[in-house]
Amino acid sequence: MTLPRAAVPVLAFARVAFTGLLAYRLRYVVGVVNYVIYMGVQYTLWAAVYASRPEGQAEIGGYGFRALVTYFAVGWIARVSCYNNIDRELADRVSQGDIALDLLRPVSLLQRGYGEALGEACMRVFFMALPTALIFFPAFGVEGPGFPPGTAGLAMAAAFGLSLVLAFHAFFLLNFLVGASTIFFEKIRGLLWTKFILIQLLSGLLVPFELFPSWARAILEALPFRAMVYGPVQIYLGKAQGAALVWELGLQVLWVAALYGLSRWLWARARRRLLVHGG
């Protein structure tokens, strides 16, 4: 089967990124340890919260303790799978002047970045996400997916996989936007840290949306960060079924499309700026 013309360079960059990252396998072992520590801290804190709840109150924000542990575990695994460093790498290329070489390539920077992010995601799935899941499930008593039996369960499993794919695209496109902004701001170290913190909080990774005030939750559910963690986790837990499942996936598709359009627009402006200043 012949690949689409645009997919050939993307897959080539993905392969190069994947093989290049194989040289740093120890970094991923350290990463797994870090995620286990993060999960251990959250488990301990929330165990104390549930232990101190009023008698007769089995749930907090609609989550029992095991359901909340599962929420955080699946959230971290999704985050591990989707994470990439395209923003930092693009910022470095701009600050070092290597971005000029990218303008001479027959492949757009967006395609190249997408291929590299795809290769990194494949590496992370095999060397971080799977080992992390193998530790999380037995160590913290993580529950299995809340899918119904039969064909409906298979459909929800497929929807969960699609949701993770969309979460990866949303994460990549947001990182590309942040990285491309280096052309306008020169130094974005502070912006990178701000983005990191915002994603941790506003994606629902640290606190579920149900525990926020109603006005804050309404804002959080309208932001693109929802597509990165909260949406996939809701599908895994079985909280998004039927119309709610279609709505969840539809929001992810909408944000991916919006971020893609914004990425193309920003790169077009950034490219013109580079040509004006660089000749």
Image: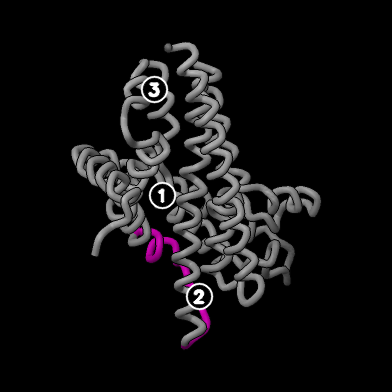
**Which mark sits nearer the N-terminus, 3 or 2?**
3
At label 2, counting other C-alpha atoms closer than 10 Å, the crowd grade (few under 14, some 14-19, many 20 or more) is many
| Residue at position x 72%, y 68% in the image | 57
Label 2: element kind? helix
Q: Tell me if residue 144 is in the magenta stretch.
A: yes
- Label 2 amino acid? Met
Disc 2 marks which residue?
A: 156
Choose mark 3 or mark 1, whichever is in front. 3
On screen, 70 above or below 102? below
Q: Which span is picked out in magenta?
A: 135-150
**Image location of residue 47, percent across then percent down:** 57, 57
Residue in the foreground of this view, choosing between 195 and 279? 279
Label 3: element kind? helix
- Label 3 amino acid? Asp
Magenta stretch prevailing secondary structure = loop
Residue in the foreground of this view, choosing between 161 and 102? 102
Please say whether residue 144 is visible from this viewpoint: no
**Image location of residue 101, percent across then percent down:** 32, 22
Label 1: element kind? helix
Task: Name the side, left or right, on which 235 lies relative to 172.
Answer: right
In the drawing, what numbered circle is on residue 80? Answer: 1
On screen, 61 above or below 244? above
In the drawing, what numbered circle is on residue 92? Answer: 3
Task: Name the side, left or right, on which 147 lies relative to 57.
Answer: left
Q: CA distance from mark 3 to mark 1?
A: 23 Å
| Residue at position x 23%, y 46% in the image | 15
Q: CA distance from mark 3 to mark 2?
A: 40 Å
